[in-house]
Image (spheres, coloured by chain):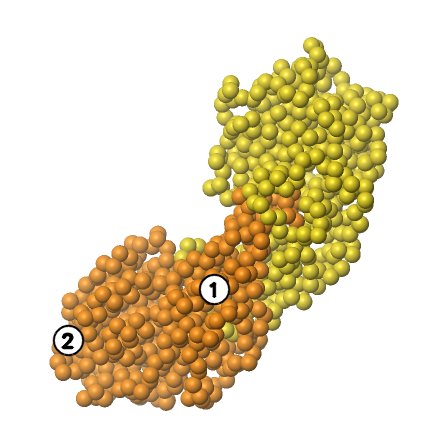
Chain colours: A orange, B yellow
């Protein structure tokens, strides 16, 4: 992409002019250079779930190493964990100061349906102050902002106020099994006082937000088998098992029109929501109905009507079907009853639901719902833990202050509906609080066509991360 | 394909040796030549539903014209109806004798899933007395048998005992709209006394069978639309409409685990089954459970347990889902909630249910079952009439006698579950009885991988059609 002179806008309106000679002035001066780096990052089609993109994973890892080196990090290297490399680097030149482990991922989701993209997903395009490309907000834009914050600080001050370690992985969208194993096995080699993750989103434009809870995940494939071979619906319709119909019956049985998940024992595993949380959600600025209507393009919100929108989106488990495989899917008509069909079904989980304790409940319920003549196997594709953080610690306080300063408004606390399975693992293995300070927006099309990242938020992410590191040095003094 | 000398077997065991110098001896002498013609026909991938195969449709039509010409037919030509050509030819050299219109189709079903074929679908292979290829039994093998019967008769006697007209179409598997229009508009140009259709199957190997009923069809696509664009199930799971889940709910609502179709008014449209028919089905030779178990590879037969297997397979309406389109269908995991999803749903209908009177019932029921936040459109892909024939006429009597003679056993009367929409149209437009004298077997994989045709039945089809034309000349004398 050619970076055109009409964009990005020169300065954020929410932040005062940076004082001359400061790191913030330096960041403002480097806007174009940083944008060009972002474009280069977004041009790499690093889709971790598709084996054909293996060389692109290597290219993306090399880009991250280059950026970390440019930022003055030491011991920058790729660690081979079997899949896409884990890229690490560190700067430990502030003895006696806390060490912040900064985590992000350089892999991206697949792009289908490609036809719905207004511009090609790996040819970044800037429109209306946003940069459009797969991975723009999830997570390349946010990862790069954190690296650039460190680079700007090093370029202007020659040092950082605290120690940092980067762990940037390449298979988050594929389940992140390798880094989980790495963290379990090498926790003692990466000691830290807190973990910073910028892979979440703000409540609304300009509203600084700290996510204190994420949902867990169980992603399964239901494999339904009927007759020994495909059958003609004319000859055998009326006596033949139809695996696609069986999957429809099962999925309708798992979740009804009321949004309630009919898996006995599932809700009983959930930690109760606290009154403090319900208070935060009730006082959230803005109108969630209007915001969701704008983001989603709908005016009704199916699901459990007895719960508030924020609770349904982040603190209740959900069940979704993502795709059916099998039978006839082309134009026209074919009257086949397939011998086998599959469905991708996932659950978002809330603590203390886990992939491990929910899978047997799901399997038992699917067995119960399976109609005669069909067998259904529930395959565990991947799972991840959710978490609810204790927000009362100096690192969350530092992040809250940094964000409030950068955006000029009080920071709010949110639960997010998505899953960041590595976060609970960091907390457990490293004994360190996790700080989610995200700069994305919910409607930036993550995992969907026309993914984008607001460029002002890209720069806010750089400034805000600088402020965070400074606040950490102060509040932990 | 090279035709190897190990097959086919030389003679059928069920028929006495043909007398020297007769048409039947001639057919026996021509077995290899006829088989080579069948192989050439099956090598043409004439898949009418896939636009890429348009040139193959032309090649298949040319082959049929060549065969009709070879058989001594006159005015052999293709008629352009917009899609694949309708091939016609006639011999009207028996004044005062009845005219038989012989119908069949040269197009075939798609071949997916290709990976399940033991040999490539358009490289005919002979194994265990069967010829394997897409279209072998449906309908190229049966069409060619009828043409070869006429060719053998002309070659030995120089004339036919009755007049014949051939109408061989190329879009039966795609809905057959063109020939239906042709028959409606040109009925007066193709007067006939009876219609012969060989596109049905026998009850069991060696059991001569006449089908007197076929089901009708309504093939639809349900198009479900939710949010304005694809959504991430983490961010929006719990409040987002999911068109795939909506389709699962709707399909589960349309047909439950008991096989009953929950569309108000549907069953009320059906003609009652007669006691005479239930008697025929009850006296059917063989064990339907054992036969179906062998054909389908299952030991339970889901569906309406209050009805007999023959009734459920041919005299009850059915509803099947054939495929879901939308969302994520590759290996691995993607947590997308698609903005749009579609499902292919068909109903097999029994007289007097029609696509026209059932579609509004289906649409009303789908509207009733559609969950909030989703809109669902029911698109009519194609439809066709079913029929139940009056078997008490000289043409069915001729076919019954011919088949009994050819196979050496009494002919049975069946309803078939599949749809041959042109048949009721012929009956209505031409005012002529329709005779279904089929030589296929139900387990020959029609519309499925590894389709095949029993070679002995191919030759029975040639001999049997010769006998039918002779019996027609006699019984209508």
**Image point (31%, 67%), residue name:** A105
Q: Position of residue A140 (x, y in %)?
A: 32, 68
Q: Secondary structure at mark 2?
A: loop
- Examine the rendered structure and indicate whether residue A384 appears above or below residue A15: above
Q: Secondary structure at mark 1?
A: helix
Give the residue at mark 2: A92
Q: Give the numbered dot on residue A362.
A: 1
Q: Position of residue B317 (x, y in %)?
A: 71, 51
Chain for mark 2? Answer: A
**Image point (51%, 50%), residue name:** A225
Is A391 situated left or right of B23 in this image? Answer: left
Chain for mark 1? Answer: A
Q: Is residue B182 visible?
A: no
Q: Give the numbered dot on residue A27.
A: none
Depth check: give the residue in front, A263 or B390. A263
Q: Is residue A409 visible?
A: yes
**Image point (43%, 57%), residue name:** A379
Residue A448 in which image quadrant: bottom left
- Examine the rendered structure and indicate whether residue A90 appears above or below residue B271: below
Depth check: give the residue in front, A189 or B120. A189
Q: Position of residue B329 (x, y in %)?
A: 47, 56
Q: Are marks 1 and 2 in contact (CB under 8 Å)?
A: no
């Amino acid at each position: 992409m050619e970076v055109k002179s009409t964009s990005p806008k020169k300065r954020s309106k929410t932040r005062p002019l940076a004082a001359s000679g400061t790191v913030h002035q330096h960041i403002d001066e480097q806007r174009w250079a940083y944008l060009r780096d972002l474009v280069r990052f977004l041009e790499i089609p690093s889709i971790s779930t598709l084996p054909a993109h293996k060389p692109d994973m290597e290219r993306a890892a090399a880009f991250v190493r280059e950026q970390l080196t440019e930022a003055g990090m030491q011991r920058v290297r790729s660690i081979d964990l079997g899949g896409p490399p884990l890229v690490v680097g560190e700067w430990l030149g502030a003895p006696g100061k806390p060490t912040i482990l900064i985590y992000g991922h350089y892999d991206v989701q697949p792009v289908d349906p490609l036809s719905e993209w207004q511009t090609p997903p790996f040819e970044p395009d800037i429109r209306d102050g946003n940069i459009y490309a797969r991975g723009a907000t999830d997570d390349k834009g946010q990862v790069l902002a954190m690296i650039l914050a460190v680079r700007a600080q090093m370029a202007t001050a020659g040092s950082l106020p605290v120690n940092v370690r980067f762990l940037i992985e390449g298979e988050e969208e594929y389940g992140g099994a390798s880094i989980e194993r790495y963290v379990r096995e090498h926790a003692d080699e990466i000691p830290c006082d807190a973990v910073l993750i910028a892979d979440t989103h703000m409540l609304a434009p300009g509203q600084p937000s700290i996510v204190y809870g994420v949902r867990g995940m169980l992603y399964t494939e239901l494999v339904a088998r009927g007759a020994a071979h495909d059958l003609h619906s004319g000859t055998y319709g009326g006596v033949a098992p139809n695996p696609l119909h069986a999957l429809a019956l099962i999925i309708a049985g798992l979740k009804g029109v009321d949004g309630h998940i009919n898996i006995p024992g599932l809700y009983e595993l959930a930690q109760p929501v606290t009154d403090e949380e319900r208070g935060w959600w009730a006082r959230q600025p803005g109108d969630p109905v209007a915001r969701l209507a704008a983001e989603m393009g709908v005016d009704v919100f199916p699901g459990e009507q007895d719960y508030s929108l924020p609770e349904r989106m982040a603190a209740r488990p959900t069940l979704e079907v993502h795709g059916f495989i099998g039978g006839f899917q082309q134009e026209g008509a074919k009257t086949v009853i397939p011998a086998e069909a599959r469905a991708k079904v996932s659950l978002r989980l809330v603590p203390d639901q886990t992939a491990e304790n929910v899978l047997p409940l799901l399997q038992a319920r699917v067995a119960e719902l399976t109609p005669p003549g069909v067998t259904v196997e529930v395959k565990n594709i991947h799972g991840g833990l959710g978490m609810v953080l204790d927000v009362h610690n100096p690192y969350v306080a530092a992040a809250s202050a940094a964000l409030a300063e950068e955006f000029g408004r009080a920071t709010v606390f949110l639960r997010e509906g998505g899953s960041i399975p590595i976060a609970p693992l960091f907390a457990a293995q490293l004994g360190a609080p996790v700080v989610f300070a995200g700069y994305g927006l919910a409607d930036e099309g993550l995992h969907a066509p026309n993914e984008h990242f607001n460029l002002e938020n890209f720069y806010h992410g750089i400034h805000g991360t600088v402020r965070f590191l400074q606040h950490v040095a102060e509040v932990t003094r």
